[in-house]
Amino acid sequence: MSSPENTLEILSAELLAFARERDWEQFHSPKNLAMSLAIEAAEVMEHFQWLDGEQSRALPPAKHDAAALEMADVLIYLIRLAEVLGVDLEAAVRRKMAINAGRYPVAASRGKSLKYDELGD
């Protein structure tokens, strides 16, 4: 990522500085970051375990705040992983959205939860 022109680049620079100040870059291999990302994602899921759909939409304030902090951890590790691997997340998201637009045309997928290869013609 080059000059901080968008929020993701600014966050990436701040997270890199945070890691460098603590000499943590030595631990931030792609493998370690990917594992930490998955672990934190599981911690997000833990806040929703055993809830039905409606309950998951109406978390009590304390649980909502705890889930938000776990989501922050997920984003932190994702941004660090992208920085270490040299991935432009904004470009990757836009590319993936274009792919998904082709896989999930509105007419075939609207209101359906089917995977693209199950949509038919």
Image: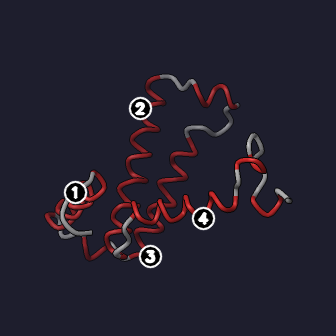
Q: Is residue 86 above or below residue 63?
A: below
Residue picked out by circle 4: 99
Q: Which residue is nearer to you in this view: 101 or 78?
A: 101
- Three-letter residue code for mark 3: Lys
Residue 90: image x %, image y %? 39, 60
Question: How far apart are the two marked residues, 4 and 3, measured between alpha carbons?
Answer: 26 Å
Question: How far apart are the two marked residues, 1 and 2, measured between alpha carbons?
Answer: 29 Å
Figure quadrant of residue 97: bottom right
Please state, as top left, top right, bottom left or bottom right, where the C terminus lies in the image.
bottom right
Secondary structure of the residue carrying numbered label 3? helix
- Relative to 24, 89 lies left or right: right
* Residue at (45% x, 66% y) in the render: 92
Residue picked out by circle 1: 5
Residue 76: image x %, image y %? 35, 55
- Relative to 54, 34 lies left or right: left
The residue at the far right in this view is: 120
Question: How far apart are the two marked residues, 1 and 3, measured between alpha carbons?
Answer: 28 Å
Question: How far apart are the two marked residues, 4 and 1, measured between alpha carbons?
Answer: 25 Å
- Three-letter residue code for mark 1: Glu
Residue picked out by circle 2: 65
Residue picked out by circle 3: 31
Residue 4: image x %, image y %? 20, 59
Please state, as top left, top right, bottom left or bottom right, where the N terminus lies in the image.
bottom left
- Three-letter residue code for mark 4: Ile
- Relative to 32, 105 lies left or right: right
Secondary structure of the residue carrying numbered label 1? loop
Residue 27: image x %, image y %? 31, 73
